[in-house]
Image: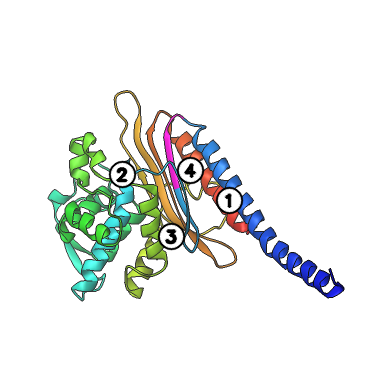
Amino acid sequence: MSMLRTLAFLLCGGILWGCSAPAARQAARRAALERDLRMLADSVRATVGAAVVLGEGDTLTLNDRPDYPMASVCKFHQALAVLDSLERARLTPDFRLPVRSSDLLPDTWSPLRDARPEGGYSLSAAELLRYSVALSDNNACDLLFRFVGGPAAVERHVRRLGATHTRIGADEATMHRDPATQHANTTSPLEAVRLLERFRRGEVLGAACGDLLMRTMISTATGPDKLKGALPAGTTVAHKTGSGFRNAQGIAAADNDIGIVFLPDGRSYSVAVFIAASAEDDATDAAVIARISRRIYDYFISR
């Protein structure tokens, strides 16, 4: 082999090695992430599913299936439908909806009822969304269901957005009358995270309504020990939590959190963690979600 051909061979080999080495390291990091998430999921007496968008066209899933009860996570789906309805009607989120005393049901989580139990007033759609999404208020949720046309209308909307296996069949009042109906509202981690990702990219709402929902989710007060629980102090997370009922044997139907995590360098990513049929207590479920969230965060920081 001539000196020129030898030099060309070595140069080409060096280029190929230089290109393949980062790809190999990235594949190894991804494999380690998947292995660690599976270990965390297997550490509890529950079914744990997760999904995260790692990059363009690259989504990692764990125990993905379409029958995870959403609990209050569906209030994110509802918010998309409500804001889309306002946009189509050329209304702003300042549009006001009546709140009757009969809408403020007892024996359900409702900061709105606790603050203003008398009824007979109106609130803006934006304020009701704050109660429903950021505070997970069940009465506010059902007021918004009534405005948008019920659970079936929300299901139709998110299916048009690509969540073709997501089911939304019960409002909060129905679920509180019959806890078995919480299984009427289900999704998969993958469909939830893909919907979040479309929202993160600004593909499902106009700028004003999209910004409103993002700010509302960032202000979420529920579940500080879930997706945010093990992240560095000050990390911004726009998220929606959900907690299901427990049956007579103490098994929790759901303990969930989905959200968008903002990194210090300006990047962000979409992540969903669902826990179904859990024999653990609430604190243990939340800790698993937090540990999964931190492991994913560390993966992004190391890239």
Q: Which mark is residue 289?
A: 4
Residue hosting label 2: 71
Q: CA distance from mark 1 to mark 4?
A: 19 Å
- Find numbered disc 2 in the image and state the secondary structure of the residue it sits on: helix
Q: Which mark is first along the chain, 1 or 2?
A: 1
**Image coordinates for residue 290, horizontal then vertical, percent:** 51, 44
Q: CA distance from mark 2 to mark 4?
A: 16 Å
Question: Quadrant location of the C terminus?
Answer: bottom right
N-term-proximal mark, 3 vs 1: 1
Quadrant location of residue 49? top left
Which marked residue is nearer to the observer: mark 3 or mark 4?
A: 4
- Dot 3: element: helix
Q: CA distance from mark 3 to mark 4?
A: 18 Å
- Can the viewer see residue 132 in this picture? no
- Residue 18 found in image quarter: bottom right
Residues under labels 2 and 1: Cα distance? Answer: 30 Å
Q: Name the residue nearer the viewer: 229 or 81.
A: 81
Q: Which residue type does callout 2 highlight?
A: Ala
